[in-house]
Image (cartoon, rainbow, N blue to C red):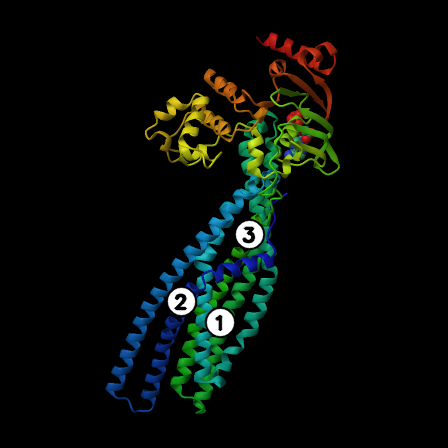
Amino acid sequence: MQLPIASNEVVRAYARKLISSHKLDIVKMLGLYALAAITGLIPAWVIGKIINLATSNTLHTSDITRLVIILLVSSLSFALLTFLARAQSYKLGETIFATLREEFLASVLALPLIDVERAGTGDLLSRTTNDVEALSRTVRFALPEWMVAILQAVLTLVAMLLISPLASIGAVVSIPFLVFSTRTYLKFAPPGYRRERMSYATMSGTISETAEGARTIDAHQLSSRQSRRIEGDINESYFSEIYTLLLRMNWFPTVESAFALAVATTLAWSGWLALHHHLSIGAATTLTLYVVQVNDPLDRIIMWLDELQIGQTSLARLVGVSVVTDNRPTKGPEPTSEVIVMDDVHYSYRAGRDVLKGISLTVRPGERLAIVGPSGAGKSTIGRLLAGIDAPRQGSVTVGGFALAGLPLDTLRRHVALVTQEHHIFIGSLRENLSLAKPDATSEEIKNCLASVDALEWAEALPQGLETELGTTGFSLTPAQAQQLALARLVLSNPHTLVLDEATALLDPRAARHLERSMSAVMSGRTVIAIAHRLHTAHDADRVCVVVDGAIAELGTHDELVALNGQYASLWRSWRNESQEGS
Ligand code: ADP
């Protein structure tokens, strides 16, 4: 399921807002371009004048000098004004694009995790790369060039009408061709471009999934299946490109022929009028030159229309991200109790297929609870619900009586945190990396939490201590140090309950001994719910909850469950035998 695409109204409203916030600069830019366009009309008019003088046998050198000076000055002013207008429009384009990018980034960061998970990384990746790129071309070049071209075309048309409305009719014959072919194109192009963009998203999704899951694909010999999927995606984008290409192949030649037709008919018609003394030869020349001249802006209007379509589609995809609403409130109750309760929880990823079927469980504050069970039983899903990432379809998951999924994110994080292996280092100082968890943390607090995970010593030995820049562009930490940072961040946000999914937990088998010490420092004094994939975790836990096929099969201490001689006992026996054989 891809992220939504904004409707036309939403996109238009967004564009209006964007334009009105830069109204003054836009008016300034258009004013400069209008001046440039007017000066650009002078040369053809001067040439007409010279021809009139030449044909009337009243040519004086002084007149010629005057006209040539006008020609020179107008050409120079045209160059200068165009330069100034371009500078202004590039500046404006950059400013608007920067705003767009910042707002897009803000909405991406505000996306609820659950929507990102559902949409997959490919869609978001394609929006942040292909669509931002396409939009950048539109905002920086297409839009200003297009507005300018329209302005030039309109002004040229006005000049033509001022010279002779009757003679201008000659150019009109090409209008039906232009309008008809452009309308047809505009009708079929947007869905075509949307399909094209979507096919890129699907393709990059499949490719990045394949690259990320390369080992799994190898292990399960899925490579030919994956190749077929990629081939299918490539086919889809090939055909969607062919479709838009065919549209352009029809449209462009029609437009070019219409231009040529306009010049020919204007020349013939105004020439006939001049021969019959309804128009001066100079005026006929100026008119025909204007029609030749207007080809250029019209051509640009049409050429950029294509780019504008792509830009519009991309904008709809970018604005679409901000349409996703986060149902999580920003303000809410502050639970006072630390008791987490799951009551008759049902959950499904796909409608009609419950993976959790009526789970009821009370987590006692301070206990170590291990959740065990066969693969696919729903353990990780329970973990996600206990961490408040999603709400159950039916039933409730509460802390102190309040639904976890309904708590504001910062409140939630002070209660429960899901501990995963994603120990991301952000570009920024060590302090900034930690204070993400608590923006108002003092240096003292930051040092304390580093000390509690055994990381203060190396942190203080960094070139600039807490202010050392980290991340891809800064100082690079060892994987163990990065994990300690993630743990320190947890200590700083200080949740009373940790949900530890062992499959993706911080501790990888290569982790150094002292990391385990850091981990137990983080766990001490907190409730820990461990999704246990290794049964020795269950052995050390206060209670073990056995989940089979989305329901709790057994619940009790390790000894109780072994004595019960049920599911857990047999799991335990087989696991112990395996580990003994292994050792
Ligand atoms: P466990 O952690 O016990 O292995 P999970 O909670 O990961 O089990 O999965 C429980 C069931 O839900 C499985 O049948 C799994 O295929 C399904 N499942 C898990 N994640 C998703 C998802 N994102 N979309 C659809 N089905 C899912």
Mark 3, residue position: 319
Q: The C terminus lies in which quarter of the figure?
A: top right
Q: Secondary structure at mark 3?
A: helix
Q: The N terminus lies in which quarter of the figure?
A: top right
Q: Secondary structure at mark 1?
A: helix
Task: Identify which amino acid the numbered label 2 is placed on.
Answer: Lys
Q: Could you tell me residue 398's position as x and y percent?
A: 66, 32
Mark 2, residue position: 28
In the displayed structure, does residue 119 sit left or right of residue 104? Answer: right
Q: Earlier in the sequence, mark 1 or mark 2?
A: 2
In the displayed structure, does residue 436 sit left or right of residue 534? Answer: left
Quarter-of-image position of residue 403: top right
Q: Are marks 3 and 1 in contact (CB under 8 Å)?
A: no
Taking the image as four quarters, which one is ligand 1 found in? top right
Q: Could you tell me residue 10's position as x and y percent?
A: 59, 57
How far apart, in angstroms, are the residues tagged by discs 2 and 3? 27 Å
* 420 lies above or below 583: below
Mark 1, residue position: 259
Q: Is residue 392 visible?
A: yes
Between 513 and 364, the residue placed more toward the observer is: 364
Task: Identify which amino acid the numbered label 3 is placed on.
Answer: Val
- Mark 2 surroundings within 10 Å by alpha-carbon count, few (fewer than 14), some (14 through 19), many (20 or more): some
How far apart, in angstroms, are the residues tagged by discs 3 and 1? 37 Å
How far apart, in angstroms, are the residues tagged by discs 1 and 2? 31 Å
Q: Decide if ligand 1 comes within 8 Å of the CB at mark 3.
A: no
